């Protein structure tokens, strides 16, 4: 049976398994084949599937109310989830705006940054600077801020021209430099770009603290975000941390940015916020932004029909409570250390070039030659072959976005299992992955 959604944009002759049910870190298709999900959906199902504490709370909410019109009312799950979410955020974060997807939340973040500057009297500040090879969503402003040319091509008449700076991709430095002698020039490019655009016009800088699916697991040097924060402060530019993929425990800290002890002005969360139990995302803003809006116009217009939906918020509240009650952030850190060590063992295979990432968000990049770091030819379709063979062996892998090197060439995997994965299950997955890599490497 074919996936009707996939058929719209994929080869219509390709068949897809139909998932029937799931439990823990395993999913089962309608033929009762078992798959170990080594990607947690796509970094979504952070606490695993079919957790009774979450489903019970959602059923209880179903029996109360499932929709509230935000123009007239609020609801208890929304209030309680706002409070719980702020417990995961750095000090200084204050206001919460809910949405349904990471793309929506990125749009809200971009818009609220613009509104903040207007409320503060900086009418000319509107531009948002992003990073090459970043990804912030598939709606128009979020796509415009993203560095995925293949996804933008069809929509160029609508895509905005967001200025971009190089990614902190030390394995393949886009500036041709070496760390640490580079003086972290990739971060300092932000100030150069702000000056080139006109400091009076730049509203915000948006970045994934740890790079996401486009260059999975790429992690900036220790000094990177201190430099970014100082530049933003000096130039009156807001720093938006896109934590949709790496926030809420995935990297072994509450937020990915916590590894650098830097506080952003705006945080965007999604995916793991409700961990796949319901569509849910949120934007968290600093007290300064909240105060500026409240003392200015007194309101924002960033709501959607399902913003703060009580059923979704009840799921999110149950998920975050479960993470806290079971100390899963610390568990993600410990399991991440074990997983990284097991992945690094794969570097005895010539095809494995780079192992990178933090906690349970890791990436593998494959090369034709480890010394030169030459990528494999795109026509070999290596990532697709790895994912397909692993699936046949009962292991779900996330093929990172193709073309991580130059938009065409570059093969990689995103490794992002649920926080509840055991060391034995990691061993099971690594065993399958090794067998697949041994078969497919040239």
Image (cartoon, grey):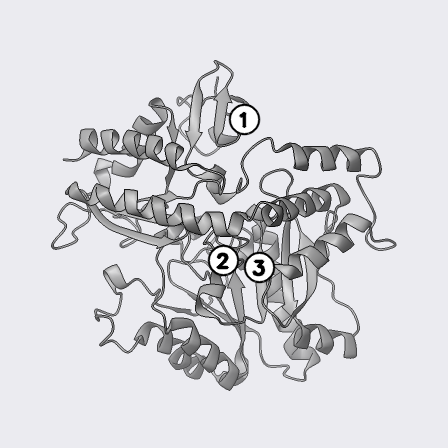
SS of the residue at dot 1? strand
Question: Is 442 left, or right, of 295 in this rendering?
Answer: left
Q: Residue 108, image x and y in percent?
A: 63, 61
Examine the rendered structure and indicate whether residue 70 appears above or below residue 16: below
Q: Which residue is mark 3?
A: 268
Disc 1 vs disc 2: Cβ atoms closer than 8 Å?
no
Q: Which residue is mark 2?
A: 253
**Residue lying at 40% horizontally and 23% vertically, measured from the top left:** 14
**187 or 57, which lies in front?**
57
How many neighbours does mark 3 have within 10 angstroms: few (below 14), some (14-19), or many (20 or more)? many
Q: Residue furthest right?
A: 72
**161 or 102, which lies in front?**
102
How many neighbours does mark 1 have within 10 angstroms: few (below 14), some (14-19), or many (20 or more)? some
**110 or 394, which lies in front?**
394
Is residue 411 something that shows in the picture? no
SS of the residue at dot 3? strand
Task: State the CA–CA distance, disc 1 to disc 2.
Answer: 27 Å
**273 or 294, which lies in front?**
273
User: Which tag, 1 or 2, sits closer to the chain's start?
Assistant: 1
**What's the mark number on residue 22?**
1
Instruction: For the C terminus, give its image quadrant.
Output: top left
How many neighbours does mark 2 have within 10 angstroms: few (below 14), some (14-19), or many (20 or more)? many
User: Which tag, 3 or 1, sits closer to the chain's start?
Assistant: 1
Question: Is 386 left, or right, of 64 in this rendering?
Answer: left
């Amino acid at each position: 049976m074919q996936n009707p959604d996939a058929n719209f944009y994929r080869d219509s002759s390709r068949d897809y398994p139909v998932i029937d049910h799931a439990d823990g870190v395993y999913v089962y298709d309608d033929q009762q084949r078992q798959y170990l999900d080594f990607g947690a959906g796509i970094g979504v199902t952070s606490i695993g599937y079919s957790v009774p504490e979450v489903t019970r709370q959602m059923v209880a909410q179903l029996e109360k109310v499932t929709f509230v019109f935000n123009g007239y009312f609020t609801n208890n799950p929304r209030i309680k989830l706002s409070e719980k979410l702020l417990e995961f955020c750095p000090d200084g974060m204050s206001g919460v705006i809910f949405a349904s997807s990471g793309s929506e939340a990125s749009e809200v973040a971009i818009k609220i940054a613009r509104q903040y500057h207007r409320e503060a009297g900086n009418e000319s500040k509107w531009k948002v600077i992003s990073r090459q090879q970043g990804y912030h969503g598939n709606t128009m402003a979020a796509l415009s801020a993203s560095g995925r040319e293949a996804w933008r091509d069809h929509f160029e008449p609508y895509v905005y021209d967001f200025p971009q700076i190089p990614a902190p991709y030390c394995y393949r430095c886009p500036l041709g430099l070496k760390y640490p002698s580079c003086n972290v020039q990739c971060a300092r490019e932000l100030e150069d770009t702000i000056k080139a655009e006109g400091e009076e016009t730049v509203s915000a800088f948006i970045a994934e603290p740890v790079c996401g699916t486009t260059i999975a697991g790429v992690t900036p040097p220790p000094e990177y975000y201190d430099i970014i924060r100082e530049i933003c402060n000096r130039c009156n530019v807001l720093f938006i941390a896109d934590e949709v993929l790496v926030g809420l425990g995935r990297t072994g800290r509450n937020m990915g940015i916590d590894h650098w002890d830097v506080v952003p002005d705006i945080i965007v969360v999604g995916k793991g916020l409700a961990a796949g139990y319901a569509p849910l995302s949120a934007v968290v803003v600093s007290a300064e932004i909240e105060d500026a809006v409240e003392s200015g116009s007194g309101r924002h217009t960033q709501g959607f029909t399902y913003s703060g939906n009580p059923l979704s918020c009840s799921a999110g509240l149950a998920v975050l409570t479960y993470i806290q009650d079971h100390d899963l952030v610390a568990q993600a850190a410990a399991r991440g250390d074990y997983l990284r060590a097991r992945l690094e063992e794969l570097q005895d295979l010539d095809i494995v070039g780079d192992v990178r990432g933090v906690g349970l968000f890791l990436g593998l990049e494959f090369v034709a030659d480890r010394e030169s770091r030459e990528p494999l030819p795109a026509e070999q379709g290596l990532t697709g072959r790895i994912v397909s063979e692993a699936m046949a062996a009962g292991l779900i892998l996330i093929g990172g976005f193709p073309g991580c090197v130059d938009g065409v060439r570059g093969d990689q995997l995103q490794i992002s299992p649920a926080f509840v994965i055991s060391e034995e299950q990691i061993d099971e997955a690594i065993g399958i992955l090794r067998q697949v890599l041994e078969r497919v490497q040239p």
